[in-house]
């Protein structure tokens, strides 16, 4: 068991030992009892969240109340607003927002060193944690804020390159540590006249996929680092206890009044230099670029490297905590109601005014400000304030909005209108809440419902944010082609002139044949009728229907051999032309096919947004994770956070790329579920170029190498769904047009072929009422080649009566307890289900495995063609 196993009860409440001491070697600190007065400053998590199972963070206990923003891993989270505000001015570390780019390092107190060096110091130091703790320390309350706080509001206008933060990427703690100036003085820091101008910070190497060493780093000016008024500290305690893993154990930087992105966690190096940090993330993160600059322009014109747009100091900001999103206030009487929330400013500025408006900004009402910190010796304020104001409920009857803004001592205030930027950072426009009439369907009592701009979760009445609603409206209009300039005309291949007597068709005629009853397509200017071939296509009818009624030249050439191209002549109808007389067009389509297909609708109905369609869809890479030396997990953002992919279980998508003038298309099965909103995950094994055993060059995999080259923000094109098998749930499936019910699934997968099998497996096991049982043989060369083993083991352990997994390695290492060698007929007979009408065989892997093992061995076991599924 994890740390949760060490939690004890002493009769007076729960006692939680120090994780830093028991697992990471920090000096002893007393266990924390729930009866201790300081317990509320920590509220330590005691269990490993099931969301962290099978991730590198499966050892870190986390509070289940946090709202995860980027899936299971890495952890990026913020607390719910009511939980954040209920904690008061000081936020427990377990609820403090977290921005992690990768796993939380499992640091060790005894071996950790903070190196202070560079050309700007005379005496380089390598300090142990004990040496740092022994130095004079300070304890300062500081509010930390992610520069992406309230980003979701920007993303609802136009998707930035950042993920959604709500209004709770803000937290406050007491931080204890050594002043940075004292450490620099101990290292003999030089003067600016001697070339010392910047102080650079770096976290662990190899943490991130980009940059020369995979580290996250940044810098501040030497003036900032040495300024006693700025209180820059190297900290090792949060709320008077050792740091937790998510907040930088054993040591981190705190720069009060700055954005969180400058405060390096798991600090390893402090370097004094003549120039600012050259770390990749110092330039490619934490910038506010002009609103006309999108990512393409930023990269092309070098906007990332223009110093005017770097973010250091926080700007002024505020948010409403009550009324919260979807809250309903009764109008039974004109009762008093307290509106409340938070505000903060940057650079040490003091909040002097917080005010709300109920008449669209014509007049403003002053709120009462609640402070808890005293300014430092230089008059700087590093913490947020809370505020409240009492109004009468009938005051909400007239206005359509509640507006909020704050002012600081320099008379800076918040802008009335939001301004989008490519990183979605520093949004501090008025906090606007819509006010709607509401009638309770049960009690028939009337009231008013409050709608926040972009909360992370649906409200208690199922409502989403008003900016989200606007986003959905725009997406629906675009999908329906009602937004000017959005629907682009299809690109048609150049065509040769038809010969005398040859039938001709226009693109309008072809587009009418886009169904199973009549499936036409265009290839290099010729029109073909693929309807007779739908049932025989190796990839299933969907592979043809996805391009039916369209120009399929690029799709066809990207995946088909010259043999397949030679087969086209059997399905030839005629040539494509730009136009022809209307009566001729009518006769041509009637003679070629009796049943035209219905056009495919792309409207969204405004309720559920589906990404995939028969047209290619462009998706942007939002995140990439190195799973192993040659395996990557790519997360692509869907058009909005409200979109799902729209991929039935068992089907896959086509991914397109253009490489050196050649169009390449490959089929992939996402590892994310269709219920996941806002993203699609692809687990990809990269086949790098190399040399074969016979000495010949091996070019590797074109598409996997292309995906490997992608940077966050780069795009791919996808189309789907495709595939002849659809698992509908609880044993029901469709094989082409044939429906069936299966009680057992025999599965064989090799290498990356595990992904479609895993998709079916996950869908079955996510439904407790699905009685289908499964047995899988998963074949690989070495243990390092096995993808998703942790996920498979977890599913098998949790469902021992529904899933059996057997691993086979052709190059087994010493001590390997699974199968060795190759998959054999006897192995399949022993491990898989016997052939029965209610049993299916699912298989996916390299051609050698399918052609030489799966198909002949399943045939030998008695599985018919109708019960064999080749992905």
Image (cartoon, rainbow, N blue to C red):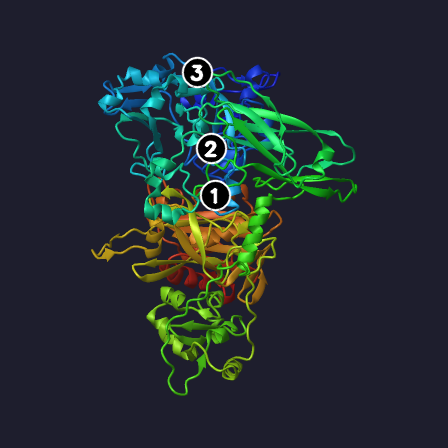
Q: Nearer the viewer, mark 2 or mark 3?
A: 3
Q: Quadrant of residue 129?
A: top left
Picture coordinates of residue 285 (x, y %)? 39, 38
Residue for badge 1 = 420
| Mark sitting earlier along the chain (2/3) | 2
Mark number, residue 146: 2
Q: Is residue 150 above or below residue 637?
A: above
Evaluate if marks 2 and 3 touch, with contact meaning CB atoms under 8 Å apart.
Answer: no
Residue for badge 3 = 378
Q: Is residue 762 left or right of residue 125?
A: right
For label 2, the SS is: loop
Q: Distance between the Cα atoms at labels 1 and 3?
A: 35 Å
Picture coordinates of residue 314 (x, y %)? 45, 30
For label 1, the SS is: loop
Dot 1: within a 10 Å radius of its alpha carbon, few (fewer than 14), some, or many (20 or more) residues? many
Q: Is residue 304 above or below residue 94?
A: below
Q: Is residue 741 left or right of residue 98?
A: right
Picture coordinates of residue 755 (x, y %)? 45, 52
User: How many numbered marks have been drawn onto this rendered protein structure?
Assistant: 3
Quarter of the C terminus within the rendering: bottom left
Q: Residue at x 55, y 75 (%)?
A: 596
Picture coordinates of residue 468 (x, y %)? 57, 46
For label 3, the SS is: loop
| Mark sitting earlier along the chain (2/1) | 2
Q: Is residue 285 above or below residue 273?
A: below
């Amino acid at each position: 068991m994890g740390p949760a196993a060490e939690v004890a009860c002493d009769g007076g409440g729960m006692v939680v030992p120090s994780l830093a001491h028991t697992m990471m070697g920090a000096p002893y600190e007393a266990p924390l009892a729930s009866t201790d007065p300081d317990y509320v400053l920590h509220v330590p998590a005691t269990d490993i969240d099931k969301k962290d199972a099978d991730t590198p963070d499966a050892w870190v206990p986390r509070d289940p109340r946090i709202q995860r923003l980027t899936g299971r891993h890495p952890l990026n989270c913020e607390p719910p607003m009511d939980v954040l505000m209920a904690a008061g001015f000081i936020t427990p570390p377990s609820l403090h927002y977290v921005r992690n780019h990768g796993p939380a390092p499992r640091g060790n107190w005894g071996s950790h060193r903070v190196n202070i060096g560079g050309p700007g110091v005379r005496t380089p130091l390598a300090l142990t944690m004990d040496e740092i703790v022994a130095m004079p320390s300070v304890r300062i309350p500081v509010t930390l804020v992610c520069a992406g706080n309230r980003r979701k509001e920007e993303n609802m206008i136009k998707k930035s390159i950042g993920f959604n933060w709500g209004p709770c990427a803000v937290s406050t703690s007491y931080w204890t540590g050594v002043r940075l100036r004292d450490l620099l003085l101990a290292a003999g820091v030089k003067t600016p006249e001697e070339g010392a101008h910047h102080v650079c910070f770096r976290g662990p190497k190899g943490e991130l996929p980009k940059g020369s060493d995979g580290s996250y780093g940044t810098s501040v000016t030497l003036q900032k680092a040495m300024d006693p008024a700025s209180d820059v500290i190297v900290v090792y305690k949060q709320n008077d206890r050792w740091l937790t893993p998510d907040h930088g154990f054993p040591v981190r930087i705190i720069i009060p009044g700055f954005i969180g992105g400058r405060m390096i966690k798991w600090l390893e190096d402090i370097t004094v230099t003549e120039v600012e940090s050259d770390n990749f993330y110092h330039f490619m993160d934490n910038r506010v670029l002009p609103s006309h600059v999108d990512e393409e322009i930023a990269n092309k014109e070098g906007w990332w490297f223009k110093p005017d747009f770097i973010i250091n100091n926080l700007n002024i900001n505020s948010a409403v905590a009550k009324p919260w999103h979807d809250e309903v206030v009764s109008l039974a009487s004109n009762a008093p109601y307290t509106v409340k929330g938070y505000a903060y400013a940057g650079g040490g500025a003091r909040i002097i005014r917080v005010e709300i408006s109920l008449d669209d900004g014509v007049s403003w009402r002053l709120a009462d400000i609640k402070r808890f910190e005293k300014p430092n010796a230089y008059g700087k304020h590093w913490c947020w304030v809370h505020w409240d104001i009492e109004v009468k409920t009938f005051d909400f009857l007239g206005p359509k909005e509640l507006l909020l803004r704050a002012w600081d001592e320099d008379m800076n205030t918040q802008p009335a209108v939001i301004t989008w930027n490519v990183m979605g950072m520093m949004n501090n426009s008025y906090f606007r809440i819509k006010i709607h009439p509401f009638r309770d369907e049960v009690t028939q009592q009337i009231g008013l419902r409050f709608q926040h701009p972009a909360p992370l979760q649906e409200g208690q009445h199922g409502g989403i944010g008003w900016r989200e609603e606007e986003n959905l409206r725009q997406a629906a209009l675009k999908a329906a082609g009602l937004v000017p300039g959005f629907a682009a005309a299809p690109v048609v291949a150049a065509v040769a002139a038809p010969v005398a007597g040859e039938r001709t068709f226009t693109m309008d005629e072809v587009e009418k044949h886009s169904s199973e009853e009549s499936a036409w397509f265009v290839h290099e200017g010729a029109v073909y009728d693929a309807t007779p071939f739908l049932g025989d296509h190796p990839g299933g009818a969907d592979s043809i229907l996805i391009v039916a009624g369209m120009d399929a030249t690029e799709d066809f050439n990207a995946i088909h051999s010259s043999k397949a191209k030679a087969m086209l002549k059997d399905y030839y109808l005629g040539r494509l032309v730009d136009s022809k007389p209307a009566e001729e067009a009518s006769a041509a389509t009637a003679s070629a096919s009796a049943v035209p297909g219905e056009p495919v609708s792309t409207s969204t109905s405004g309720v559920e947004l589906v990404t995939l369609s028969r047209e290619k869809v462009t998706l942007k890479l939002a995140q990439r994770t190195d799973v192993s030396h040659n395996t990557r997990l790519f997360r692509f953002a869907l058009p909005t956070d409200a979109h799902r992919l729209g991929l039935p279980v068992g089907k896959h998508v086509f991914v397109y790329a253009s490489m050196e003038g050649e169009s390449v298309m490959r089929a992939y099965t996402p590892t994310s579920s269709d219920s996941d909103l806002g993203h699609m995950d692809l687990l990809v094994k990269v086949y790098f170029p190399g040399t074969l055993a016979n000495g010949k060059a091996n070019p590797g995999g074109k598409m996997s190498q292309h995906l490997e080259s992608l940077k966050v923000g780069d795009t791919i094109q996808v189309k789907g769904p495709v595939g002849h098998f659809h698992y509908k749930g609880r044993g029901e499936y469709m094989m082409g047009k044939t429906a069936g019910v299966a009680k057992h699934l025999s599965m064989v997968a090799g290498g990356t072929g595990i992904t479609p099998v895993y998709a079916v497996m996950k869908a079955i096991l996510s439904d407790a009422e699905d009685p289908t049982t499964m047995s899988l043989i998963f074949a690989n060369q070495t243990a390092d080649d096995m993808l998703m083993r942790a996920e498979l083991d977890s599913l098998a352990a949790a469902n021992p009566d529904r899933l059996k997994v057997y691993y086979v390695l052709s190059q087994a290492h010493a001590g390997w307890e699974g199968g060795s060698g190759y998959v054999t007929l006897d192995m399949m007979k022993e491990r898989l289900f016997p052939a029965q009408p209610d049993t299916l065989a699912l298989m996916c892997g390299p051609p050698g495995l399918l052609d030489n093992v799966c198909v002949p061995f399943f045939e030998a076991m008695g599985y018919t063609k109708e019960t064999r599924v080749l992905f």
